Image: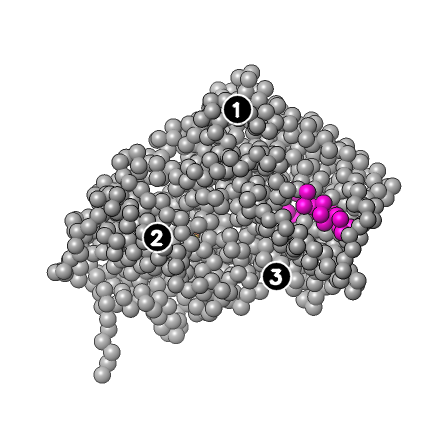
Amino acid sequence: MPVKKRVGLDRVQELYENRDMRAKELKAEGRTVMGYMCCLAPLEIMSAAGIVPIRILGNVKEPVTRADAHIETIACPYVRSCLDIALKGKYDFIDGLVVPHTCDNTYALYAIWSSGIVPITPKYHHYIDGPHMTFPTSVEYFDVELGRFKESLEEFTGNKITNQKLTNSIRLYNRNRALLRELYGLRKQGPPLLTGTEMTKILVACRVIPVEESNELLGEVIAEIKNRRAIPTPKTRLLVYGGEIDDTALIELIEESGANVVVDDHCLGVRSFWHDVQVDKNLIHSLGARYILNVACPRTYKQRERGYKEAMDNRFGYLMEFAKEYKVKGVILYIIRYCDTFELDAPGVREYFQKAGYPVLHIEDDYSVTTIGQLKTRVQAFLEMID
Amino acid sequence: MVEKSKTTAVHSSETVRKIRFFSRNIHDKANKAKAEGRPVAYCMGGCAYHEILEAMGVTSVYTEHYGGVCAAYRVSEPYLIRAESEGYANNLCGYCRNTIGFDIVRQELGHMPEDAPDGGIPAPDMLLSCSAGCDHRYKWYQATGRYWDIPTFSFDVMQIPPFDTDIKAIKPYVMKYQVEQFQRLIDFLEKLLGKKMDWDRLAYLVKRGNESLWTWYSAYLLRKHHPSPMPSEDHFSAIVPAVFDLASRETLAFYRELYGELQFKVDHNKGVLDQEKYRLLWAGGLPPWHTMAIINYFETFGAVFVMEASDYGPWPFFDVPKGMTNPLEILALRTWCQRVEYWEDAKKGCGHSRVQRILNRIEEYDIDGCMMHLTRSCRYQSLGQIHFNNLIQKYVNIPLMFMESDIVDVRDYNEADTKRRVDAFMETVDSFKRKGGRQATARR
Ligand code: SF4
Ligand code: SF4
């Protein structure tokens, strides 16, 4: 009897549990698979070259045992986790590694992973230098870097990335973004049509399959959710802001404590997909502008034109908008220890929300199920305080 | 067991001894500028803008420097705690936590804290940061902006490119962008101060800055001598003029004097120790400003840190091409040359320029052992040390120890544990030396 293809949320669950499953199948079919870090990697260019980009995820459930022989314990624990599971063979199937310049931690990780002295160095590795500033010339600088990246992929794959291919690819990703935004829209109502835990699984699933499949899957998921009978019970509505969240452990703990996580801004969430890429004459420039100007990551610096208050509005106004639009009652800051960019912003973000009347819980965590588990009492107390 | 020396008299540099006053003078100049109503900026090392600020009449206060000074006087702790109580994580850069805490305490008191070393630093009129090196460099003043609601500007300054970069391909646009970024800083300052850049003065200051850096560089080549004329504890003081006061006349005078002193010592075979038994390399990490005396503990074994391979080092010579007259281009070229200094060697060698710097210095300075300081609050200087060691050992079999503490936060330092590590390390260095010293490994 043929195995029935799983669809919708069922398929999401399957991909969430077996994150390398699809990439390995595609690899067996002869496709080139590349791992990438962070929200600054231009996936459109990779897909246009016929590559399957998959996001390098860590594993909060896996204790770090191998990475310590290569990277210091004061590194971001997410980065340590990625290296650790890679050293354990988890990413053996990737043909290439793409790391954009995000932070000191990914810079260090790239040097190790692609050094050739660890057994995991893939055939192809490329570092994209992203400027931290957002001047027009910074975007131009990034354009040149993207152009070089494109050429190097062409050389590696032997596939010419034509304008047409890039246009198609951008359209596919914009479609993906639109679908994700639509899905987020289903969380605006009270109660939300899907839980934060479900959303986390969907976000993970979408990052480990090709964009065409991701679009198809999202279509199925949206239809399924729109038609569902049993909707989540209304609880305290929260926004979660922070770094890498690629496991349900934290969101589940929050939701089990009596909340609905209805919107987020973290590395797999809103930050990675909210803004489209414009399809116009200079596609590389459109990509450059989107990744440098629109990815609201603390690693990207927005000039401060006027006073502090205006600067905060300029940097975090979008987040406040989300809070209002999604009618949240409180905000949780999930900051990964040793992530300096987020840690330096966190007290300011906390104050920004508190001044606007939102209770804020500022969590500093080690990106591990054990430490996440210990947050239960604090989360419960926070929710009691809101109620 | 490795023996401790009977006499541990350390002959430090006479020139470097003056740094206390030099450093004090930097802060005096800033406090005076403030009192006289001249603009003062909070600044960061590595942004390569010192001459630009000086030419615009802006007095710079390097907040990293002040962090180090506070640590050396061991007055940082209350500042660190104050910053942490605001929600700044206790693993953020010690310089940064120190100064944020200092700013808060000063604002709360309404005057300079009484125990502020060097009479304190003045309240800034602007915050000028950049993206060179670490993430703190452009994030720190965003945080500081909560306490100082004053004009703020940040710009890009190139990083050390990752080891596998094709530097010939990137040089043209990296340089172009760098020059443009400096120009943007000037535009910002001109608008803010309502005055124009004095380009002739800038050209003059850049030229003098180059000369200071090159004199410093030449002086350090003399440290190859046996016995070494100058130890790392002096180096970490000798960086002050170049990193925090590059444009001044006094800085050039300082390095000239240092050069003269080291040349004299080399000519007369005067070493740091009367009996230099082991030559060590400070192979990475920043100094533990709170406990610099730990370096003397190595000296009790007859070991001298004769050289460093950290990013706080002298900048290399470079040729200013004929016809290059724009001082911003020269500044960009200077920065470029520093960032890619060991590139060509690395291509022929281990592949990684920062590691190649260590490997080269091990040979050139005839090193018996290396030490890296894992600075808990500085990811930029600390991440990669284990990897570097793994790579080093592929090329040369040499003892290497890791010391763990922090630049500023003495709470991260355990003296007994550190000394135990040093004891064990010196045993290894000694036994290596007895067996003929460091050995090139097969891959070299
Ligand atoms: S979580 Fe922070 S430190 Fe870690 S990779 Fe992301 S930006 Fe870098
Ligand atoms: S390099 Fe390290 S010590 Fe220096 S400012 Fe950055 S984080 Fe702090």
Q: Which secondary structure, mark 2? A: loop
Callout 1 amino acid: Met
Residue at x 79%, y 45% (from the top left corner): B8
Residue B410 makes an appearance in the image: yes
Q: Left of B401 or right of it: where is B100?
A: left
Look at mark 3 in the image and give the residue it sits on: B390
Q: Is residue A81 magenta?
A: no
Q: Chain of mark 3?
A: B
Q: Which secondary structure, mark 3? A: helix
Label 2 vs label 3: CA separation? 37 Å
Q: Nearer the viewer, mark 2 or mark 3?
A: 2
Look at mark 2 in the image and give the residue it sits on: A375
Label 1 vs label 2: CA separation? 40 Å
Few, some or many C-alpha atoms within 10 Å of disc 1 (few <14, some 14-19, many ≥20)? Answer: some
- Magenta span: B293-315
Q: Is residue A381 above or below residue A306?
A: below
Task: Tell me which corner region of the image, top left, top right, bottom left or bottom right, holds residue B270.
Answer: top right
Q: Position of residue B121 (x, y in %)?
A: 55, 26
Look at mark 1 in the image and give the residue it sits on: B112
Residue A287 makes an appearance in the image: no
Q: Position of residue B192 (x, y in %)?
A: 47, 23
Q: Position of residue B350 (x, y in %)?
A: 64, 59
Q: Left of A91 or right of it: where is B27?
A: right
In this view of the protein, which residue sits in the foreground, A341 or B277?
B277
Q: Left of B150 or right of it: where is A238?
A: left
